[in-house]
Image: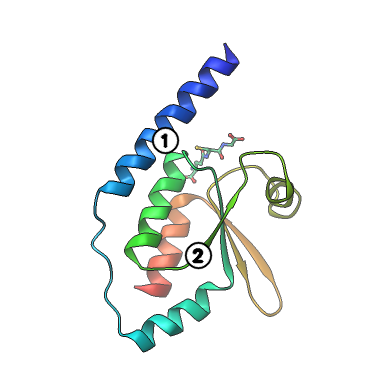
Amino acid sequence: MKLLLKIFRNGLGAIIAFFSWIIPVGKTKRSHEAQKEVDKKTQNLELYQFFGCPFCIKVRRVIRKLGLKIVVRNAQTAGTYREELLKKGGKIQVPCLKITTDNKITWLYESAEIIVYLEKRFR
Ligand SMILES: N[C@@H](CCC(=O)N[C@@H](CS)C(=O)NCC(=O)O)C(=O)O
C-alpha cells in the first residue's frame, strides 16, 4: 500500500513537472552584464528539493522566470544532500534554499518565503 502510494505520488509529481516545463513562464529580460551579475550572486544559492514535489515545482518556475542559475540538490533519496538538509537545515522538508554568505549559512524553508526572497533579490 505504501509503495503504491509512493508510485502514485511520484507519477503525479512527474506529470505536474512535465506540464510546468511545457507551460511558458514569461522570462525576465536582462542585459548581458546584468545577467552576469545575477549569475555571480546565484553561485551562493542551492535549492534542496524533490523532483515531483508541487512546492518545489512552484519554486523552480520562479527560478526559471527570473532566469536564475541555481543548482538543485536531490534530497529525496538517501545520500549526502538529504543528510545535509536534515543535519544542518534541521528537518527534511523541501523546498529549502541554502544561502551561503561570507560568514554564515541560512537554510530558508517554505516555498512562499523562498519565492519572496528570490523575487525581492532578483526581480
Ligand atoms: N509549506 C511547505 C510545504 C512543503 C512540503 O510539504 N514538502 C513536502 C514534499 S511535497 C516534504 O518536504 N515532505 C517531507 C518528506 O516527504 O519527507 C512549503 O510550502 O514549502
Q: Residue at label 1?
A: 14
- Spatial CA span between label 2 and label 1: 20 Å
| Quadrant housing the N terminus | top right
Tell me, yes or no, whether the two marked residues, 2 and 1, touch with CB atoms within 8 Å. no
Q: Secondary structure at mark 1?
A: helix
User: How far from the left and from the top, in percent, is residue 92?
Assistant: 65, 42
| Quadrant housing the C terminus | bottom left
Q: Is residue 111 left or right of residue 27?
A: right
Name the mark on residue 119.
none
What kind of residue is marked 1?
Ala
**Mark 1 burial class by Cα count in 10 Å: few <14, some 14-19, many 20+:** some
Residue at the spot 36% in from the left edge and 61% down from the top edge: 64
Q: Is residue 1 left or right of residue 16?
A: right
Residue at the spot 64% in from the left edge and 64% down from the top edge: 106
User: How far from the left and from the top, in percent, is residue 6?
Assistant: 54, 23
Chosen colour scheme: rainbow
Q: Considering only vertical position in the picture, is 82 above or below 4?
A: below
**Mark 2 burial class by Cα count in 10 Å: few <14, some 14-19, many 20+:** some
Residue 16, by quadrant, is top left
Q: Secondary structure at mark 2?
A: loop
Residue at the spot 24% in from the left edge and 54% down from the top edge: 24
What kind of residue is marked 2?
Ile
Q: Residue at label 2?
A: 70
Q: Is residue 116 left or right of residue 24?
A: right
Going from N to C along the chain, the mark reached first, 2 or 1, is 1
User: How far from the left and from the top, in percent, is residue 17?
Assistant: 38, 41
